[in-house]
Structures are given as C-alpha cells and as structure tokens.
Image: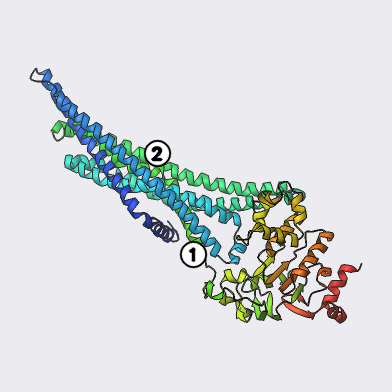
Amino acid sequence: MNAHSKPAILSSLKKLAGLLYPYRLSLFACAAASSVSIVFTVIAPAVFAKAIDLILAGSLKSVTNSGNIDFPTLAKLLLFCLVIYFVSAAASSLQAWLLTGISNKIGQNLRGLINEKINRLPMDYFDRHRSGDTLSLLMNDVNAVTMGLNQGLPQIFAGTLTVFGILTMMLMTDWIMTLVALSVLPLSAFFLPLITIKSQASFRQLQENIGHINGVTEEVLGGHFIVKSCNREEKTIADFEQMNQKLGSAARTSLFYSSLIMPLMLFAMNCGYVLLCVAGGFCAVWGRITVGGIQAFIQYSNLLTQPLGQLAGIAGALQQMFAAVERITVLMEETEESPDPAAEHELESAVTEGEVCFENVRFGYLPEQTIIHNFSLTVKAGQKVAIVGPTGAGKTTLVKLLMRFYELNAGTITVDGRNIRDYSRHQLRSRFGVVLQDTWLYSDTIRENIRYGCRKATNDEVLAAAKYAHTDNFIRTLPGGYDLILSEGADNISQGQKQLLTIARALLPNPKILILDEATSAVDTHTEVQILRAMNNLMRGRTSFVIAHRLSTIREADVILAMKDGDIVETGNHEELLAKNGFYAKLYNSQFTG
C-alpha cells in the first residue's frame, strides 16, 4: 500500500466510526446477538465430539458383548445440539435484522449530510465539478458504504470473536493438533494483505470512473436535442465508449483481485484438512485424542479459516466502501461558504430602500485571472440600471457578486449602506427577484413552479403574478392550466413559455430589487413588448438591474453602464451615450445598421 493509501484508509475508518457513534446502543445489541450466535456455534463441535465418542464406545462394547450404546444420553446430546443451532440461528437473524436497520439509517443520514453539504458549498465548487459526479456521490457512493457496512461489519466482528473462541476450545482439547491447525494460517495471512493492497487502488479508480461516466451521461441526456442537431452522435458514442472501457478495465481489475482471495483461502483450508487428518491419525494411535476429537478439530479448522473466507467474499464490497468513503470525505472537507455574521431576525427589515453601491470591486473566478478591475458604482433607490457590453465583459458576474454567489477579491458592495456580508444570505437574497438567461423549472405543476420562491403565496397571488408577467393567457390554453405537471426539464412547453414562467416566479415575492439577465431573450417580439410594458410598471419604485443584448429594450433606463473587459467605460442615459458617439453608440448602431 502506498503512502497515500494508509492515511486515506485510516481517515475513512475514523469517518465510519463517527457515522456509527449515534447508533452505539443498537450496535451493542447487534454485537450481543452476534456473540451469542458465535458462542453456541463454537460449542457445537465439542458436543458432537462427545456424541461420536459415545456411539463409538457403545459400538465397541457391543462387539465384545459387554454393553451397548447409551441412547438416552445420546438423545440428550443430539437434542442439546439442536437447541444450540436453533439459538445460534435465531441470534444470527436478530443480528442481521438490527444491522440492516443500522446500515439503512446510516445511508439515509449520509445522504442528508451530503445534501446539506452541497447546499453550503460555494458556487465555484460547481464550476470545478460535474453535476453527475456529485450525483454519483449522493447515490452510488452512499450505496457502496451501506453495502459494505451491511456485509462487512458483522463479518469483521464475528470473525474476530470466532477466532478467539475457537482457539480457546482447540487449546483445551489438544495443543499439538492446535499447532497443526494453525500452521496453515500464515499461508492465508500472506495472501490476503497482498491482494488487498493491489485491489485498493483499482476500487478507488472504479468509483471515480463511475462518477465520471454518470456526469457525462447526464450532460448528454440533458442536451440530447443539441447532440442530434449538431450530428455529434458518433463522437458522443466514441467518447462514452472510451470512458466505458476505462470503467470496465477498472472493474475487471478490481474484481479479479477480489476473486483471487476465495480460491487461495480454499487451498489453505484443504491443506489444513490434510494435515489435521494425518496428525489426527497419529495422535489417535498414541492415545492423545479420540475420533470425536479429530472430527471436532476438523470442524474447528473449518470455522477458523471461515472468517478469512468470508472476508474474501466481501472483499469487493469492503474495498468499494473504503473508496466511496474516501470520495465522500473529500466532499465533506471542501471549503464551505463563509458563515453569516448576523442573525436573520436582526435584519428582517434591513433592505427598505434598495440603494446599491459598488466600491472598488475586484473579482476573478480564478485568483490569477481578474475579470472585474476596480469597479465602482452607486445606484440610487428606485433607479433602473441597464448593463450592456460584449460577451465576457462581466455583466452577469456583477449581479452574482451582488447576491453573494461569489465572494469579492477586494472592495465592498453595500445595500442601503450596509455591507452585503453583514446580511445573512437568506435575508439578502429574499429581497431580490431574479430572472436569468438559463430557465430552470422542475417537475411539478405550473402553479408550484411559480410559487417556488414564495411557498406561502396564495393562489390569487400566483394568478396576479402570472398576469403581470403576461403568462396567464398561455397557461389557460394548456391542458390542465395551472395544474399542468411539467415534465423533466419542462420539455412539454416552449422555451419562451419557460422564460415567462420564471419571470412570474421572480415577481411573486414583490421584491425590492429586480435583476433581469436577458429576461426576454427567448420570447418573440410581440411578447417581449408586452413583458417590457409590465416590467416598466413593476420597476417603478424598485431598484432594477437589467442585462440585455437587445439594446432597444433598455433605452428608457435611468442609467446605462457600458462595460468592457470588467470595467465601466461609459455611463449615462441613452441619449447622452449616443451623443458621445463612443463605445455604446457603436454597440447600439451595430444592431440597427447594415
């Protein structure tokens, strides 16, 4: 095992211990049931040995006409054996039932922890990771952990207790035969660590490949229409096949190593049988042991090597569990969003006017790549601010910084004179109504999608928001109207209709500050005019940030910011900027001249 693997496994074990701690009482009951099962299992061979010796003694006496088999005693021994195996089976079943409940609860708890962690992660985490890989952590890796716990935990505990109990019984019976039985253990102990070391890296690679292939599959399925329209089927299939081959290779390697353990364990067990039979024969001749004792030792030898054989059977599940725990641990150790310094109730009514001020703001998604340089701007309450500029100028980045999706590298942003870092994120974002370029709707009714950001809104309020956004008319033409259930990805309505619904959703909470990032980019010209009329009424008395590439839609803005390479190069209203005949004028004229 390399230097990296040992700390990783130790860290995984510590993490598992933390997960198991809340269930310590259930685990204690599980361990007690397992102990009862093992104790009775270990006692059984000794009882059988007495029964066999009783039969042989009675048979020999019968041959010499000096006695016969003591059937009453034999019946008691066999009945005792029956009781032993019944109690052992009942205790084992109880242990399995308890452990299944524990592992399922741990899986449920782990999925909850991961989901909570995901919601505390900063946005740059999702810029660096595929959503499918994160989904794989939530499902595949958690399942691997629960499977490993359900299969591996009882075997490890039971194996340790079984070995201790069997060695005690063997030593009480005959120490020479005990040494013979133990002589095959070094052979087993030699193979097991070697194979475990080899397979650990393969199982880690297997879990990573599962995450990668899930991520790519989700991307392709989500953009299936684009894949087909761009004739990328062959390239997509080829890329998938390449990843599938890597996944298959890692699976074959890991399963090959784990499947080697059982044959090697069986080989060691058979060697032990041969040695015990030979040594038992000599010991019987010397009078050190009876035939029943030999039979008991053969059973004990089988029980002694059984834990290693069971470990071989669950090696794959254990390796996958450790690999999954390592991946989950990496996620849980990711840096979270900085904590909110203020309690929410202290700022319940903090945003009352909507004045926004950017002061010497500096930001880059990567530390070495700054995209907004020393940006300063004061927006008075109720003003309508339009932000224009070429793609990559930093327009959308500004509103993401305003809502604290990302933290500033330098400078400050204030709302009503208070630094946005002094607000809790919940209270800050609850004052914004946001419509982004990318529409997001989930599989539920249209009514619930509009109500998504304001769960307490009444049906009348939902209806009013839909009318303001000029959405009510098209909703009523749909089968089911407001109760129509949208499909996954909302593919049963058009892109323009999706955007209308997101506008209605943004207007429902009656926000103090509106952010419209290309809010009308997917609607037709007639609908756009209707929406803009409604927006002009709704933006009165509210601070509004409008990002638009269609410059005809922002001519009535109080302030127009022309951005280029992360800086404001021009500021003014539409007429003032046209009169300057500068950067904005070139952008505007380029849309209306040949």
Q: Secondary structure at mark 1?
A: loop
The mark that comes first in sequence, 1 or 2, is: 2
Determine the residue positioned at 15% across, 31% down: 285
Q: State whether residue 461 is above or below residue 103.
A: below
The Cα–Cα distance between marks 1 and 2, rounded to whole angstroms, is 39 Å
Q: Nearer the viewer, mark 1 or mark 2?
A: 1
The one nearer the camera, 248 or 384, is 384
Mark 1 nearby-residue class (10 Å; few <14, some 14–19, many ≥20):
few
Residue 558 screen position, x and y as percent:
78, 77
Residue 543 screen position, x and y as percent:
71, 74
Query: On the image, numbered disc 1 is attached to which residue?
Result: 333
Tell me, yes or no, if residue 48 can be seen here: no
The one nearer the camera, 288 or 415, is 415
Left of 573 or right of it: where is 267? left
Residue occupying the far left of the picture: 66
Amino acid marked by disc 2: Pro
The one nearer the camera, 528 or 56, is 528
Query: On the image, numbered disc 2 is attached to which residue?
Result: 263
Determine the residue positioned at 55% across, 65% down: 121
